[in-house]
Image (cartoon, coloured by chain):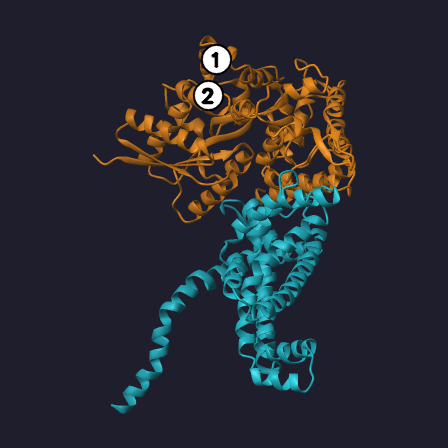
Amino acid sequence: MAKTKVQFWHAMSGWRIDLLNSMAEDFMELHPDIEVEVQYTGSYNDTLNKLIAGIKAGTPPNVVQVYEIGTRSMIDGQIAVPMQDMIDQDPDFDIATFMPQVLNYYRIDGKLYSMPFNSSNAILFYNKTMFEEAGLNPDKPPRNYEELKQACAALTEKDKNGNIVTSGITWNLHSWFFEQMLAMQDAPLVNNNNGRAAPPTEALLDNEAGMKFMTLWNELTEKDYMINTKKEDWTGARKLFLSQKVGMLITSTSDVVAMMDGAEENNFEVGAAFLPTPKDSPKGGAIIGGGSLWLIDGNPDEETKAAWEFVKFMAEAPQQIKWHEGTGYFPVRKDAVEQLLFEGYYTEYPDHLVALMQLLFSKQDYNTNGAIMGVFPEFRNTLENNVEKMINGQLTPEEVLEKTAETTDDLLEEYNELYE
Amino acid sequence: MKGKGINFRKILPFLLLIPTLFVIITFIYIPAADSFEMSFNRENKFGTRTIFVGTENYGKIFTDPEYLSIFGFTAVYVGLTVFITVFLSFFLALLLNKNVPGSYVYRALIFIPYAVSPAIAGTLWTFMLDPVAGHVNYIITALFGQQIAWLTTEPYAFIALLAATVWKMLPFDIVFYIAGLQSVPDDLLESATLDGAGAFTKIWKIKFPLVSPITFYLVIMNIIAAMFRSFATIDVMTGGGPGGYTTTMMYKVYLDAFSYQKMGIASAESVVMFIMMAIVTVIYFIYGQKNVYYR
């Protein structure tokens, strides 16, 4: 019998390629009649471009990993088989085992369009060894912006020429952190319930929550308490932290494993903490980041069925545990978390627990469920460009938010016109 | 019989051109026509929704202050890189044309950047210009006690990009100049020497005018290279930053097309670039044949 071929495109680089390949091999052992062709198709953005090319050429893949911010345009493009349709037809599949926080992100109008797969959010890593040397309590990471500034002041050291020897903190110049910091203060990013009640028409940046974080960013930069990287330079930020040039790093929880290993290699003790928030602001929570798996329409039914089996398999507890342990992306299922808990995994790796707890403590509402909009990539680039101008002293925090909101409103209008 | 033979001979070139034409039409003319058409549309990411917007895309780019500043930046970037590259390469070619021992080794070494792909070149420069662990800042800190964030601040990002682009384009020009200088007749230089011409006169009054066809060709080629091929270097080194400061027209097309999947705007931008390059090419064809004197 001929094998049914399933093409799976993903955007996970490095050691994660091998990990995904081995997971696909496990799947093929269980399903000898299905052959999964796993392909690393570059970054999320590259993968999306290849998907677009594939669809336009009439040769779409079966399963594609798409970043969370692509959700709206994937739905509007009407190129995918909604995951909900497959779930409804499959009595074996129990969606109730999934983490509600994850489902809340990916469910739009009560419908799940894609299968949650790799989920993360942002957390704070800090160098306990440097904390101690700077006279800070290594068991008390900063919890609010004031404490953060104080810690940065203690960690920052300059030579006689005014050059930075060590600095307080870094996060790579990425809009994602701004989005997370808004949600941590229970503030929305766009109107219409963060785009979840109806397509958004307006960006809601010019508020207290946005101002507080943007002002912090500006202040830390001006005082050299923070080293800024290039746009979306995750590696650069990690390097600054691991080389102990900065004492703290805000990055994705998917870096937990890399940070633990890196700290050991570089002889320092690393700690993880929740994201700091302004002292007097409302408490929100973390937004789910990462990616999910989409079933692409336009393929033979037989292939789509096989692809559904594969997607289902990837979201099962054993695979999610393997994925979690190998990367730091947290499991998208409750039963996977339970099992890890019973095995004592979180006692052994408390940093993983911190990442998970931050998510569990998060208030669940539209603000922390994350914004949904079709122009997310452009929004991010607009914000990042304006932040770069702020760092170069050309814009004030207020202007950054104003200008970004202005551009975003235009982008949203343009996008919505397409679907009128 | 004779008539038939002549006919066949007339047809033959066209027959031989067919394969090339086929490739050019499939991969250049059709996509070009497509993007011309697309420049009047707005479509969603996957091309499943398209609306006709007329000249709105063009109106948008020419009224967008960001695009106009990109236009200005591109002009400065292309102008400066071409100017520096041409003069520096002429100067280096003069040196390399001297029969010093080991000049072949130098020539080989200097040609290496041309063989490096633009993306790799960008990566190498990024390593060297790293503000913390880079070689360049190591030296600058040792000498002047200053740390410079080369790729993330103005105007250093531009300077870094300029250096990398010039470095990358130099070898091509040098090779052409060396070839040109070698064909400058020795007797001409000898007689000039006898007439009492100094080194300066010999270079600017004899050698430079004699290689002017090459200079003209190189200027055109460099403009094209700086306009189109510098994409990878920019992408790797600055990503068009900080704050869009080093975004060229080419990079903007890439951003709109492949980061935001706005094919309409991106197509309009590439049509604008097409028109600009068409003008450059026409100038080349007119002046390249008329105004530059071959000896």
User: What residue appears at the point 52 percent right and 10 percent down from the top-left corner?
Assistant: A347
Mark 1 residue type = Tyr
Q: Say which quarter of the image contains residue B276.
A: bottom right
Front-most of residues B196 and B62: B196
- Whichever of callouts 2 and 1 sits on the residue coming sooner in the sequence is 2
Q: Secondary structure at mark 2?
A: helix
Name the side, left or right, on which A268 lies relative to B33: right
**Residue behind mark 2:** A325
Q: Do the numbered discs 2 and 1 sit on residues whose CB atoms are within 8 Å?
A: yes
- Badge 1 marks a residue whose secondary structure is helix
- The picture places residue A146, in percent across and down from the top left corner, at 76, 21
Quadrant of image for the N terminus of chain B: bottom left
The kind of residue tagged 2 is: Glu
| Residue of label 1 | A345
**From what the image shows, is residue A300 above or below residue A114?**
below
Q: Specify whether A339 is left or right of B37.
A: left
- Which mark, by number, is residue A407? none
Looking at this view, name the residue that lies furthest to the bottom.
B2
Q: Nearer the viewer, residue A163 or B40?
A: A163
Mark 2 → mark 1, Cα distance in angstroms: 9 Å
**Residue B120 rendering spot, x and y as whole percentages:** 52, 49
Side of A145 where A256 appears, left or right: left
Residue in the picture at 73% in, 17% down:
A135
Residue A324 as seen in the image, left or right of residue A168? left
Please determine whether, in this image, residue A137 is positioned above or below residue A407. above
* Chain ID at mark 2: A
Q: How many marks?
A: 2
